[in-house]
Image (cartoon, grey):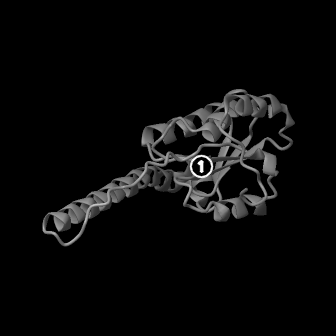
Amino acid sequence: MIGGIVVPSKSPEKCAAVRKAASSLQTGVVGYIRVSTEDQNPQLQYDAMDATGLNKEDIFYDVESGTVKDRVGYADIIYYVKRGLVKKVLVWKMDRLGRDPKEVLNFFWLCDEHGVEVESLTEPFVANRTKTPGDFLIWWISVGLSVFELLTLRVRQRAGIDSKKEAVKKGKDIWKGRGPDKKPRRSNV
């Protein structure tokens, strides 16, 4: 449960049920919350959505890396956009939409094509990106920064792994590895 929202499973039946309920969107506004792992707390994002007055039923949620394109909640929002059922998509920060610049740009272009606004609750330049050259430039750079952050994280991870392996070689530590691989769950609300 997240902020009072029961997060359903990722079963196709649940997704189909959500899609059938598309006509229940009262305002045409949906929210999208994403965290990369189960260990991360989405409460900050939820609280920001809640402060807008958005219905809990209209908030979609994924626990998945932003590098993964096949996210259930994200796919459902795209479904709604393509069918003209959404007027606005709210996100806490633009990087919640994903880390792949091509995917993020395609999402924005899809929304533009269908007359859907995209608003970041913490980055006003996102909503204004088509209104002023300066906001467009900041938005464009931000798309690149999300990739920069991901690449920087990978460099730090690799350095940590290499350091640990070197310590093991010198007998200063023991290698425990990553442990059991826990695939993050994906879900939508």
Quadrant of the image containing the C terminus: top right
Mark 1, Cα crowd under 10 Å, few <14 / some 14-19 / many 20+, is few
Kindly identify the residue that appears in the image at 44 percent across and 38 percent down. 102
Between residue 94 and residue 136, name the one nearer to us. Answer: 94
Residue 133, x across and y down, in percent? 50, 52
Q: Residue 8: x and y, percent?
A: 72, 43
Quarter holding the N terminus?
A: bottom right
Q: Is residue 129 left or right of residue 154?
A: right
With 164 as the anchor, is 88 left or right in this view?
A: right
Q: Position of residue 74 (x, y in %)?
A: 61, 40
Indicate left or right for 176 with 68 as reference.
left
Residue drawn at 77 percent across, 45 percent down? 58
The type of residue carrying mark 1 is Lys
Report helix, strand or loop for mark 1.
loop
Image x and y of residue 13, in percent: 72, 29
Q: To which quarter of the image does residue 170 belong? A: bottom left
Query: Where is residue 18, by image quadrant?
Result: top right
Nearer-the-camera pick, 91 or 59? 59
Residue that mark 1 sits on: 131
Furthest-left residue in this view:
170
**Depth check: 182 or 126 in front?**
182
Taking 73 as reference, is 162 above or below it? below
186 is higher (above) or lower (below) than 160: above
- The image shows a total of numbered marks equal to 1
- Nearest the viewer among 58 and 61 is 61
